[in-house]
Amino acid sequence: MKNKNLLVVLQYLEPGGIEWLVARQTKDLQSGSLGWKPVVFVYDQGPVKPIDEVIIQNGVSLVRRQKGSGFSFAVIGNLLKLFHQEKISVVHVHHLGALIYAVFAKFLAFRKIKIVYTQHSFIHLYKYPKYRRIEKLFCFFADEITAVSEQVQREFTQFNISRKKIHLVPNGSVFPEVKLASEEKLFRCRRDLVRSEGWSESVNGQIEKKWIVYLARIHRGKGQDLALDLWERMSESVRTGSVLLVIGPVMESDYFSELQQRAQKLPDTQRILFLPATNRAGAWMQVANVFLSCSESEGWPMAPMEALGAGVPVILSQIEGHQMYLPYSRQFELSDRKNGAALVEKELQQDFEAQRSAQWLRTEEIRRRYSVRTMNQAYLKIYEGAP
């Protein structure tokens, strides 16, 4: 390989699992010890403030363009320009749209460029079956295909998308080096975090309550409505000493309005707090007493992994996308909200220090197996392998 210049192509750069994954992956590559130079190209702007500043602060080159509606020939032109200016040898894409643009640009570039396509979830094919033919066509032109979980790996065969070898590369993250060992330190970290976010007024008086943190994009299917069901089913004695923090960017405003209206009708509504998107998701998970996800479908969800890596007790919906976390978490059937509420209650009633110490030891394998460096080493074998 003549050079080690990587172009990562994304449609959006909003605070979400894939975007944070790219931020951490490119930061690790940029560190220099791996010998690769990453560039991130973003071609669209969503409704939520992007995390551009995080990429830039990491010392990674970021190129942003705004495409118009529909298919954009300008994006292909932008890619061609970057191919030549940055002497790109590998293009890594995480969305079908980005794959389509990368394939067209490669054909027009008349250069030897490897396209690596990572699939995180096939939820779009369940919702829009017409995309199956498009996915199958453009996967044919991808040089390497990776799946983030065994579930996604199986779905390539299930949907008859590609007969190529599908590499399994689990997502990686950054984890705390030490656990929060005492409630005193927990409360101090909470105060510092809330102050740094500018959310002191919203969370005022709740610092020493038991925190149930629900951190995810706010749209249908992510389960925030089910979290409200669990809150309602919790006993009054436990609920009175607890706070439900729903944190994340609003992707569906009508759904968000429904959540707010529903929350206002629930008991102890003053302790259901909706907070906006954050660039410090990991810090919010670390100061939780319980991390909760009632999601209806996932590929390889990052948030539960990061919460587990922080040594936090985790309660999850029992879906296929959460099965890899079963040894480290407690799970409930989506239809059994009563059991879900009981699991949350049980964790909230444990002694903090004993609970956190036990969970930290239980999740040691998470921190070892799913680091960003472990993920990058797997990707480098794919980047540097023969086309």
Image (cartoon, rainbow, N blue to C red):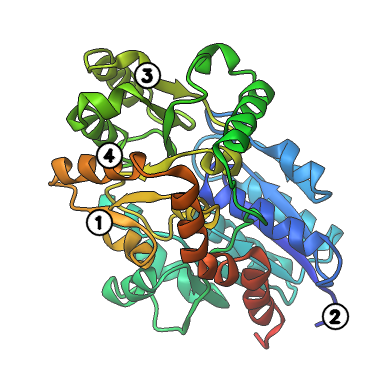
Q: Quick check: can you spot residue 29?
A: yes
What residue sits 43% from the left and 22% below the top? 274
For the residues marked 1 and 2, what is the alpha-carbon distance in whole angstroms?
47 Å
Q: Residue 129 carries which label?
A: none
Which element type, helix, strand or loop, lies under badge 1?
loop
Disc 1 target residue? 318
Q: Which mark is residue 271?
A: 3
**Mark earlier in primary sequence (4, 2):** 2
Along the horizontal axis of the image, is 200 left or right of 321? right
Q: What residue type is labelled 3?
A: Arg
Q: What residue type is labelled 2?
A: Lys
What residue sits 31% from the left and 46% below the top? 295
For the residues marked 3 and 1, what is the alpha-carbon distance in whole angstroms?
26 Å
| Mark 4 neighbour class, 10 Å CA radius: few under 14, some 14 to 19, many 20 or more | many
Q: What residue type is labelled 4?
A: Glu
**Mark earlier in primary sequence (2, 3):** 2
**Mark earlier in primary sequence (4, 3):** 3
In the figure, 221 relative to 114: above or below? above
In front: 308, or 317?
308
Which numbered mark, 1 or 2, is in the foreground of this view?
A: 1
Which element type, helix, strand or loop, lies under badge 3?
helix
Image quarter of residue 372: bottom right
Q: Quick check: can you spot residue 15?
A: no
